[in-house]
Amino acid sequence: MVLMDSRKRNRLLLWIIVLGIGNFVLYTLLYWYLGGDAPNGFVREGMYHLRGHFLWGTTGRSTGPVSRGIWLYSFVHSISIWPTIAAVLVSMLALARPHIIATMKSDSLIGGRTFVATCMTVIVLVTGASTLLFILNFARAISAIADGGSYNVG
């Protein structure tokens, strides 16, 4: 059973790659512009701060206070990076699959189909676990600040 012809599938995969790279570029530019992101930032006394470890050295430096909306957006956008990575990598593997299979003939240690399936599985498991950890961290942050508490203050 063919769900979609190969030209339509390939166009869809290319769009997933383009949109995924666009999301990553947007995240990177906003991380730079805002001075960090919420998962690395903190909330203290009702004030929301971002922190950018990679912009300001290994210890990082926090921004001045930002709005709750910016802080929430930053956190959610940070969560979106993990499924974006998965979508881009899996799409690239799907596009390259025929070439990988042709290159990894029977004389290879493992076959091309097995290699592609293993890579896709590892990508989905690692990015899925990372997404889950970020979501749990976000839930923990929302829970802590809902009662007027602090988050990530250390």
Image (cartoon, grey):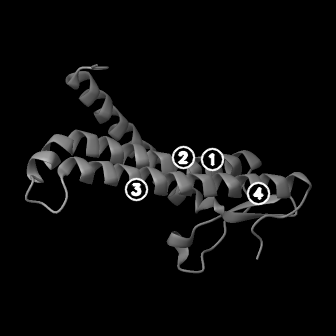
Residue 62 percent location from the top left of the image:
66, 69
Residue drawn 91% across and 57% down? Answer: 148
Question: In the picture, which quadrant includes the C terminus?
Answer: bottom right
**Spatial separation of the CA atoms under disc 3 and disc 1:** 24 Å
**Spatial separation of the CA atoms under disc 4 and disc 3:** 28 Å
Q: Is residue 26 left or right of residue 35?
A: left
Residue 141 percent location from the top left of the image:
76, 57
Q: Earlier in the sequence, mark 4 or mark 3?
A: 3
Look at the numbered discs 1 and 4 and tell me whether their residues touch, using CB distance below 8 Å: no
Question: Mark 1 is on which residue type?
Answer: Val
Q: Earlier in the sequence, mark 2 or mark 4?
A: 2
What residue did someone put label 3 on?
122
Q: Secondary structure at mark 2?
A: helix
What residue did someone put label 2 on?
80
**Spatial separation of the CA atoms under disc 2 and disc 3:** 18 Å
Question: Mark 3 is on which residue type?
Answer: Val
What residue did someone put label 4 on?
141
Q: Secondary structure at mark 3?
A: helix
Q: Is residue 134 left or right of residue 31?
A: right
Q: Is residue 4 above or below residue 149?
A: above
**Spatial separation of the CA atoms under disc 1 and disc 2:** 6 Å
**Spatial separation of the CA atoms under disc 2 and disc 4:** 17 Å
